[in-house]
Structures are given as C-alpha cells and as structure tokens.
Image (cartoon, helix red, strand yellow):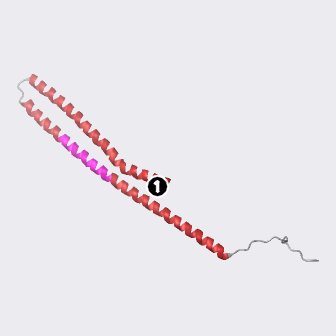
Amino acid sequence: MSKTSNKPEGTEFPTFDASKATEQFRSFAEKSAEQTRETYEKMKSGAEDARKAFEASFENAKSVGDELVLKSIAAMRVGAEANFAQFEALVGASSFSEVIELQSSFLRKQMELAADQAKEFQAISQKAATEVTKPVKDAFEKALKQAAA
C-alpha cells in the first residue's frame, strides 16, 4: 500500500508568521490606546465645561436672588412708610368724609404701587430665568457641536 497525502496536490496553506501578528497586534493596541486617550480628553473637557456652566448658573442664580431680596426689602420699606404716613393722616382727619377720602386715595396709590412692583418682579424673574439657564444652554450647544464634528 502506498502512503497517500491528505493534502491535495498544488494547494499550499499560508504559513503563520508570528512577527507580523505581533506587529499587527501592537499596532491595534496603540490605535486603541490613542482612541481611548482622545475619548478621555473629550470627556474630561466636556465635564470641565459642564462644571463651569453649572458654577456660572449658580453664580447667576445667587446674584438674581440677591436682587430679588433687595427689591423685596425695598418694597416692604415703601409699604411700611406709606402705612405710617396714612395712619398719621387718618389721625389728623377732622371728619368722616375726610377719612373716606384719605383711605380711598391711599388704596388707589397702593394698588398702583403694587402693580408697578409686580412688573419689576416679573422683569427680574424673566431676567433670572434667562441668565441662570444661559451657561448650561451654551455648554450643551457646544457639546452637541463637538459631538457632531
């Protein structure tokens, strides 16, 4: 009996070259490491931008809150002074009709003052909403642009 080969004639299998495989693996590992570094730097930059945006938002919220507190104190002071002046005027009234006239005039002025103060508080509140959200909105838009690039 003759020995037969399992390998068909004219067919050669590629040989495994360990040095090429090592070089390919090294190249793959270097590319992966570089991509990881780039991704880390982008994430780090994004986190820093977000931190700065939140800090700016909190600073804006604090300043607007301080402004609202000061306006509130001023409004209370004006109201207290007006009430004391009204009380003095009522004490000096000589007739019931004068009391009614003083009181109606006082109420009309107080309603006008309240409307003006409400407009001021509304303007401050709108400004607050815009200023507090602007840094976060800007950071989010920047992140979207960087992600798209």
Furthest residue in direction right, as rendered: 1
Residue annotated with mark 1:
146
Q: Position of residue 126 (x, y in %)?
A: 32, 41
Q: Main secondary structure of the magenta part?
A: helix
Q: Residue at x 40, y 49 (%)?
A: 137
Q: Position of residue 14 (x, y in %)?
A: 74, 72
Using the image as rendered, state which of residue 44 and residue 113 is in the foreground. Answer: 44
- Dividing the picture into quarters, in which one does residue 5 lie? bottom right
* Residue 109 relative to residue 23: left or right: left
Q: Position of residue 55 (x, y in %)?
A: 34, 55
Work out whether 68 lies above or below 101: below
Work out whether 66 lies above or below 13: above
Q: Position of residue 110 (x, y in %)?
A: 18, 32
* Residue 146 relative to residue 12: left or right: left
**Magenta stretch in the rendered image:** 58-76
* Residue 71 relative to residue 52: left or right: left
Q: Residue at x 12, y 24 (%)?
A: 101
- Dividing the picture into quarters, in which one does residue 88 lie? top left
- Magenta span contains residue 18: no
Q: Residue at x 49, y 63 (%)?
A: 38
Using the image as rendered, state which of residue 35 and residue 131 is in the foreground. Answer: 35
Q: Secondary structure at mark 1?
A: helix
Callout 1 crowding tier (Cα within 10 Å): few <14, some 14–19, many ≥20: few
Using the image as rendered, state which of residue 21 and residue 135 is in the foreground. Answer: 21
- Dividing the picture into quarters, in which one does residue 102 lie? top left
- Magenta span contains residue 66: yes
Q: Residue at x 25, y 39 (%)?
A: 120
- The quarter in which the N terminus is drawn is bottom right
- Give the amino acid at mark 1: Gln
Using the image as rendered, state which of residue 61 and residue 2 is in the foreground. Answer: 2
